[in-house]
Amino acid sequence: MHEYILDFGIQSLYLWIDAPKIESALKNLLSNALKYTPKGGKIRVAIAEKEVDGKMFCLLSVTDNGPGIAENLQGRIFESFITGENDPSFSTKVGIGLRIVKNTMDLHHGKVLLNSVPGKGSEFILYLPLGREHFKEDVYQQVEDTRDDRKEEVFIAPEKVREERSLESGKKLLVIEDNDEIRHYIHTLFEKKYRVLEARDGEEGMRIASEEIPDLIISDIMMPVKDGFTCCQEIRQELQTAHIPIIMLTAKAEEEDLLKSTRIGVDDYIMKPFNPEVLKAKAENLIRMREQLKRIYTKTLMLKHTVEKPEEEEQASLFMQQVICIVETNLTNPDFSAKSLAGLLNLSQPTLYRKMKQQSNLSIIEVIRSIRISKAASLIMQKKYSVQEVAEMVGYNDINTFRKHFTNQFGVSPSRYNAL
């Protein structure tokens, strides 16, 4: 058993806060204190009022007499998802929780500080500004509180102006994660540039992906109802979602999971706990590469345009999008052919030939080859794979044939293209 001390000497303070988020932050700190304070130890929770640089703050503190935190971790403990290597007093969950606590305090224009002495204990202090002046440039949601027949206005502490910020890029990003705090944290990482959609499990994620067609999906692996593997596999099998880049979050680096992710078409993966800047860089890179690939397709597929009949133009665009998605889904199959494409489109081969002739100056075989080589160019631009690896990833078993087709399409060899 632990000894608990509650030090609440203040009767009331005027705060504008998002109560559930502050409650979650306190729970994180208390959970850490309970986990690392030995039996018989003391945990103290206190509230106080303090003036700092001419501004008044409410201080919420959680103090324990546990093992403390190593000095080499104290200076960066809130900056990213970190772990203390070979340090049993600091776990992955602590790193994730503290980064989320800091993020919550940033949203409230406050801060969280740590005082810790190894071997003696730790004190975490949340600084919440009093009043509401610090929120003057933020946006508020005003609701009615009808509990106990009371009718009064309650102000929910503001989030940043997400929809306006998302207009910066016009892109949509879907986060599929069952942990509410991590999902919200990832949301805040991307809300400045993207419209961020959220799903709590794979089933909800698949539904939202089909309805919204996001530009990128970030998905956890272990989730209830439908796990990340099943969800991502279904996304790859649906024509309208097959092209969406996917980043998989995983808490373990087992080769079996990484191989499975690759087989179902996951574009990248990142380990938990993760560095937020690495996640943002990977996401932005995948979205950028997809845009580059679209431009390459536009140039290489020799598409015809029917400006006089916009409805036909729209149908043609949808048809070619289906063709591209199907070929991309079958890139690693060297035997994928015009017959295979016709079957997956539910068309006879003569009908497919006729429709393709209306939309492109290329034959079906040339279109399939062009999509393979265009995807290869996109992969080469990432500078992550050798030419041999890229060739295999787009369905070429013969490297010489791959080089010949690549040079014919782009005018330079794969290795030279990589240097451009």
Image (cartoon, rainbow, N blue to C red):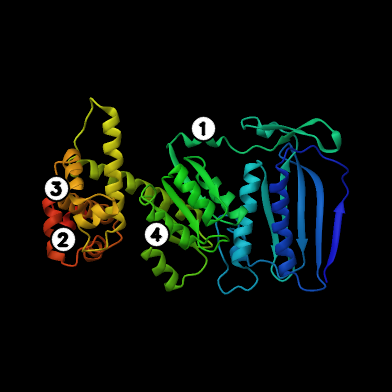
What is the crowding at mark 4: few (fewer than 14 residues within 10 Å), some, or many (at least 20)?
many
Q: Is residue 27 left or right of residue 364?
A: right
| Label 3 residue SS | loop
Q: Amino acid at mark 2?
A: Phe
Whether residues under marks 2 and 1 lie with C-beta atoms below 8 angstroms apart, the answer is no
Q: Position of residue 94 (x, y in %)?
A: 63, 63
For the residues carrying marks 2 and 1, which lies nearer the camera in this image?
2
Q: Position of residue 39 (x, y in %)?
A: 79, 74
Whether residues under marks 1 and 3 lie with C-beta atoms below 8 angstroms apart, the answer is no
According to the picture, the residue beneath numbered tag 2 turns out to be 402
Residue 236 versus residue 132 in the image, above or below: below
Dot 2 or dot 4, earlier in sequence: 4
What is the crowding at mark 3: few (fewer than 14 residues within 10 Å), some, or many (at least 20)?
some
For the residues carrying marks 3 and 4, which lies nearer the camera in this image?
3
Real-space Cα separation, disc 2 to disc 1, in angstroms: 45 Å
Dot 1 or dot 3, earlier in sequence: 1
| Label 4 residue SS | loop
According to the picture, the residue beneath numbered tag 1 turns out to be 164
Dot 3 or dot 4, earlier in sequence: 4
Real-space Cα separation, disc 1 to disc 3, in angstroms: 44 Å
Q: Residue at x 28, y 28 (%)?
A: 310
Dot 3 or dot 2, earlier in sequence: 3
According to the picture, the residue beneath numbered tag 4 turns out to be 266
According to the picture, the residue beneath numbered tag 3 turns out to be 363
Q: Position of residue 64 (x, y in %)?
A: 77, 64
Q: Is residue 180 left or right of residue 314?
A: right
Real-space Cα separation, disc 2 to disc 4, in angstroms: 24 Å
| Label 1 residue SS | helix
Q: Position of residue 121 (x, y in %)?
A: 74, 66
Real-space Cα separation, disc 3 to disc 4, in angstroms: 30 Å
Q: Amino acid at mark 1?
A: Glu
Q: Amino acid at mark 3?
A: Ser
